[in-house]
Image (cartoon, helix red, strand yellow):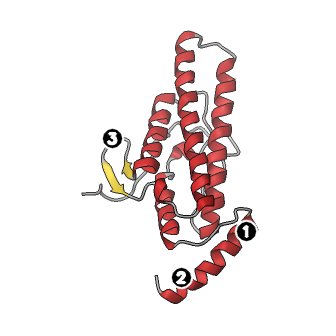
Amino acid sequence: MGAVATDILKVLIPMRAEEIGLPLNDFFPEDRALFADLTEVFNRPAFRGTFLWQTDPVPFQRAIKLTLKATNTGVVENNSGVVRKTISPITRIRDATLYASMQQVATQLKTIDNLIERLIEMRKKAPDSPQLGEIITELDRKRDAVIEALNKIWLCFGLHTLPKPTHITESTDVWEYFPGPPAQ
């Protein structure tokens, strides 16, 4: 990025962030690059539709675990465990506000993982339990909170955002789609 472009972004990005309600301490070009990489990490159907009664929670949980791994280690894998690429982990975020937001996202993802574990166990022990619906509703709420937090950040940087799920679809595919060949 050229020096003039960086100087312009150092003014525009914090202004945009302030308008969105996410005041940044400063603009760091490497933060924008990191969040651009994260758009691919979260570009999974697990973040594009509501969690349904007919959805198999095991692949959904795998998608969440892969997302957590990518955000924490920077290793982006597909559902088969093939490394697609490496990115900077969220511990490299320089702006304190963005760092805190991504820590909250990571916490939400861990909570989602725990809820899925509870759902799997409950389906085995009490498949007719009314608590199953409560867990599924909570999964949707937590996942939507992740999407809202990410979209707020991505909007600041002018990056692609995720649709917030608002209706039930018939898809049970929670795996990601990565175009192109795997990383070498």
Per the rendering, the mark at residue 80 is 3
Element marked by disc 2: helix
Instruction: Please say whether residue 102 is visible from this viewpoint.
Output: yes
Please name the amino acid that badge 1 sits on. Glu
> Residue 141 at what x, y percent from top left?
68, 38
Element marked by disc 3: loop
Q: Nearer the viewer, residue 13 or 160?
A: 13
Q: Which residue is mark 1?
A: 18
Q: Gap in Å between the C-alphas at discs 1 and 3? A: 40 Å
Q: Gap in Å between the C-alphas at discs 2 and 3? A: 38 Å
166 to the left or right of 4:
right
Please name the amino acid that badge 2 sits on. Thr
17 to the left or right of 78:
right
Please name the amino acid that badge 3 sits on. Ser
Q: Residue at x 74, y 62 (%)?
A: 21
- The tag earlier along the polypeptide, 1 or 3, is 1
Q: Residue at x 51, y 58 (%)?
A: 39
Q: Nearer the viewer, residue 172 or 38?
A: 38
> Residue 173 at what x, y percent from top left?
49, 39
Q: Nearer the viewer, residue 74 or 36?
A: 74
Q: Which residue is mark 2?
A: 6
